[in-house]
Amino acid sequence: MTQQEECDAIIIGAGAAGIGAARKLLGLESNSSQKALSTNKDNLIHLKKVIILEARDRIGGRVWTSDELQCGLKLDHGGKWIHGSTSPSNVMTKLARQHNILTTRKTKKNGSITRIVLPKKSSSSGGQIMQSFPSNKQAQMAADLLFEQICNAYGEESLLAPYKNDPDLTYMDCLTSIAKKDMPNGTFTEWVETRAKDALATTGCNEVHNQQKVQETIALLRLQICRYFEGYEGGTLDNSSLRYTFGGSCLEGENANVDGGYGKILLTLVTPLDIRFDHCVDRIDRDGCTAQCNIAGGSKTFVARQGIIVTVPLGVLQDNRLVFDPPLPMSIRQSIDRLKLGLMNKIEMLFPKQWWPDDIQTLSIASVNAPSQNSTPLGDIPFCHWIVESDSPAVLVCYTSGEFAERIEGMSNEDIQRDAIHALRLAFEGDNKCSSTGNNDILSVPDPLRTHVTRWRSDRYSRGSWTFFGAGSRGVKDLSTFQRWNLDSRNKGGNLFFAGEHACDGSVAGLDVATVHGSYLSGQLAASDLMGTTASEEEHPTNLKYARPTNYTMYRHVEERDIPPQEGYVPGRKVQVTSDPNDIAAEFSCDPEEAGWIESVQDEYLGQSGEIIESCSNGWLLVQFPRNRLLEARYFTPYCLLLGHETD
């Protein structure tokens, strides 16, 4: 039996984006919590009936906070940190403060242990005997250099610079090509070992041919790849775009933990919202503005008078289980297909007692063995990064990423627990030099009382963790596709809008891909587009007069290494790009590297109003354009910008 219900607007998904959108539509956001997106209440009529359709039996989506270990400690199984929490543009920090939720940027302890596990020798039975020992300074320095060479396409030491502008290449594509040129008759593994020897030589090491030193360096390199490449971007070396990886925006500032878990913030925001749990939408009729759900006892159709905001994760859009009728146009379909969804799974363990030293926050295991036959020498890095969540109860969480995170999706909890404990015991048991004082022995690692493992790839309502740029993507342009769609829908009276971390292109401060704060902000922007509103008059007033200050210091940036400080050109100041192309030409024409810049931006940016969001040490200014989200934030020199002054 098919039921039907009407409302003003439908939101699909009760994650951060869906909650942000609903609160915006209902007028629940105060200026103190979201000034940057507050609307002029004298001109805006908020909606009265907004329904959120959520397939799960809980809110939050990939922000999931609960006590699965049944120990009285709630853990974040997905999103954990407020990234860039100290930025004034971070909406989640503002919401936490508004609702008196404590956030902490620094932990009470910051000690760490890193142990390298390598084969010692073959046993009489043909197996390998493993040994564990501390990392050494020279191997760490060599690993740092190697990481810069093969994982940073734009660094001074990078080997990848000649390939960095090709959007269709992965890191491994380039590294494999380099290895073949360097060693036509060698294997990739042999090439990595040679590079490790060369890196060791730069540290003054006299044992560059010592195989153990070489393997230590490679093990520490693999640990860095896991923590600072896979763990940050979500992809791996063999599926991440060389050109666009690390290209998404991110607020500057320290990360913060949320007291009681990230989900606590979202939980405080949903009390007045109409959320229908266990309502899995499988079809959207764009012409009729309806969403059809499968529910217990049959199906139900919801009809929206104003519009529908789709906030399901990128992986769900890629699954094609959510049918759009008529189908989405090719432009947005291509962006959905080109973007990739990374993976981070967590292995959470409750122990009967604390067995690590009191001052320890992280435990790291560097290894070279790749258990999977399909893995690369720089992939499938198992059980390498552990965080101490609590000493009492004694809880450790292993953060897995890349190939290893994919591999554990198919393992049982029992097998994961067995292998994890084996890895911890091999690395740390009998260690009497672990703490900063050297007084806390790790005599033994006990069996855990309980283990909980996330499997975000297998989760049919997420299909992964967060968005990254795979080979063949168009970087931020693919993210901007969703914002362009929303703006077109607003301007042309459309009824379908998109939000979520995959729709965050950095066009507004805080609209950051792969973040919770970005997701929430995208929901608010989509809601504003649905209601046909723009950025607030309070935040972007129209009564501004733009001019250069009278005490402006003339300069030419191509003649002076650093631009002299200019009074008034500071973050937060409203500015306007000059309307005269001659001004830009005078600034850049004598710099050959900037010749193409003039042609590419002057038609789009001349005369546009924006806001300075960052000032670089050399005097360049990063400007965003909230009133025209189709424009990417760009760097300008002060000479190209006029300062805004309010008039009566």
Image: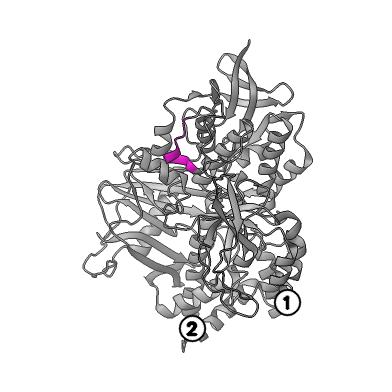
Residue assigned mark 2:
210
Examine the rendered structure and indicate whether residue 634 appears above or below residue 95. Answer: below
Q: Position of residue 545 (x, y in %)?
A: 60, 52
- Specify whether 294 is left or right of 446: right
Main secondary structure found in the magenta portion: helix
In the rendered view of the protein, which quadrant contains the C terminus? top right
The kind of residue on which mark 1 rests is: Cys
Residue range highlighted in magenta: 28-35
Q: From mark 1 to mark 2, how far is it between C-alphas?
A: 53 Å
Q: Single out the mark in the foreground, 1 or 2.
A: 1
Residue at 54% over, 20% down = 49
The residue positioned farthest toward the top in the image shown: 1
Question: At 47% across and 84% down in the image, what residue appears?
Answer: 203
Query: Which quadrant of the figure has residue 146?
Result: bottom right
Q: Residue at x 59, y 77 (%)?
A: 156
Q: Which mark is residue 590?
A: 1
* First in sequence: mark 1 vs mark 2: 2
Can you name the residue that lies furthest to the left here?
Answer: 439
Q: Residues within 10 Å of mark 2 (few under 14, many from 20)?
A: few
Q: Note whether residue 477 is visible.
A: yes
x, y percent for residue 168: 73, 60
Secondary structure state at the residue bearing disc 2: loop
Percent across and percent down for residue 261 are 37, 42
Give yes or no for residue 309 being in the magenta stretch. no
